[in-house]
């Protein structure tokens, strides 16, 4: 059964996994925003991490994996765990203050640096050049808002870039091994985020509907997109994956409209069009490195 599933997973184009991840990357947080009226952002973030950790623990049984992990592997897993804990926290603090589309646009600034670092062909550089003004339009549309929100948004941007680098290292030997490492990292991220989020999450434990909603956010925001990321990262060069992340601001804008009724301006619509054009132009480069075996990433 596992072999059949693995074969099917290999037949699915990596771009399809990325598209699913892009949708869930903001669908879950848009639902989380609706919970902020009852639970503070760090409480929702902890519920997201803890519920995802529980699901991964039941599905992949990462305890055994952690016992077998060597020092270098364990260091990588711990680094990803700390990144996931911090990234989820500052992301929710940002979307509590800024529109989802704005946070999504800022979030992409880190990956665009990674894309520029790894792209070599003229076509891909043109694709990057088309994408940058689109991101700028999406960002400038809401630039004059709460300063603290931007501090959290840019912190999330840096952590998201680190997530991409570490994620490709987790996925270095294919999707299955990467998912096991991801499960172990998520298991460790839950206690790391506990001191900051448990107190704010307490209202959920007195209301089964809030608790169920928090678990749902974990499934939508952490389990579905992170697993799809691993399956895509295992087969896409890091620069290609980073440029494809330009879809995220557009996805954030569309999810913001559909779920949160955050309507885009004309500049945001133009930005979405440029982002889509840049992704359409991009092509993965033959021979591009997919993992970081040498540390040159």
Image (cartoon, helix red, strand yellow):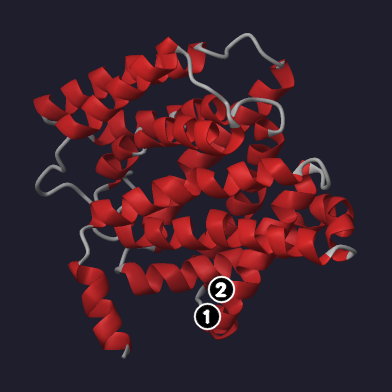
Say few, some or many: other residues with alpha carbon within 10 Å of mark 2 (under 14 / 14 to 19 / 20 or more).
many
The image shows residue 244 at horizontal and vertical percentages of 30, 39
**Measured along the vertical axis of the image, is residue 99 above or below residue 258?**
above
Say few, some or many: other residues with alpha carbon within 10 Å of mark 1 (under 14 / 14 to 19 / 20 or more).
few
Of the 4 image quadrants, the one containing the N terminus is bottom left
Q: Secondary structure at mark 2?
A: helix
Of the 4 image quadrants, the one containing the C terminus is top left
Label 2: which residue?
56
Query: Can residue 29 be spotted in the picture?
Result: yes
Q: Nearer the viewer, residue 126 or 279?
A: 279
The image shows residue 78 at horizontal and vertical percentages of 59, 61
Q: Nearer the viewer, residue 53 or 162?
A: 53
Do the numbered discs 1 and 2 sit on residues whose CB atoms are within 8 Å?
yes
Q: Residue at x 40, y 31 (%)?
A: 250
Report the side of 124 relative to 189 (left or right). left
Q: Residue at x 46, y 39 (%)?
A: 161
**Residue found at the very far top of the displayed protein:** 144
Label 1: which residue?
59
Query: Can residue 290 be spotted in the picture?
Result: no
**Measured along the vertical axis of the image, is residue 220 above or below residue 265?**
below
Q: Residue at x 53, y 22 (%)?
A: 263
Q: How far is disc 1 from disc 2 in space, using C-alphas? A: 5 Å
Q: Residue at x 23, y 27 (%)?
A: 278
Determine which of the numbered discs, if any, sits on residue 182 in the image: none
**Residue found at the very far bottom of the displayed protein:** 1
The image shows residue 8 at horizontal and vertical percentages of 23, 75
* Numbered marks: total: 2
């Amino acid at each position: 059964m596992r072999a059949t599933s693995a074969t099917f997973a290999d037949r699915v184009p990596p771009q399809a996994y990325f598209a699913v991840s892009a949708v869930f990357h903001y669908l879950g947080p848009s639902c989380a925003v609706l919970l902020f009226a009852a639970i503070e952002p760090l409480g929702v973030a902890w519920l997201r991490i803890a519920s995802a950790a529980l699901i991964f623990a039941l599905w992949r049984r990462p305890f055994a994996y952690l016992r077998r992990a060597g020092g270098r592997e364990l260091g990588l897993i711990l680094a990803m765990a700390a990144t996931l804990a911090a990234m989820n926290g500052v992301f929710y603090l940002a979307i509590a203050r800024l529109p989802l589309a704005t946070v999504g646009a800022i979030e992409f600034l880190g990956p665009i640096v990674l894309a520029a670092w790894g792209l070599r062909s003229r076509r891909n550089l043109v694709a990057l050049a088309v994408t940058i003004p689109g991101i700028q339009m999406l960002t400038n549309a809401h630039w004059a808002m709460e300063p603290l929100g931007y501090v959290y948004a840019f912190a999330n941007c840096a952590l998201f870039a680190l997530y991409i680098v570490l994620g490709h290292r987790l996925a270095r030997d294919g999707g299955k091994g990467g998912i096991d490492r991801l499960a172990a990292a998520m298991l460790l991220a839950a206690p790391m985020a506990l001191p900051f989020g448990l107190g704010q999450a307490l209202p959920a434990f007195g209301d089964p509907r809030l608790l169920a909603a928090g678990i749902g956010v974990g499934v939508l925001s952490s389990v579905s997109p992170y697993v799809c990321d691993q399956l895509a990262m295992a087969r896409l060069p890091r620069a290609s994956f980073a440029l494809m992340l330009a879809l995220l601001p557009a996805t954030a804008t569309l999810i913001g409209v559909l779920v949160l009724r955050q309507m885009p301006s004309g500049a945001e619509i133009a930005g979405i069009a440029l982002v889509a054009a840049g992704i359409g132009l991009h092509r993965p480069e033959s021979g591009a490195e997919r993992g970081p075996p040498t540390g040159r990433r």
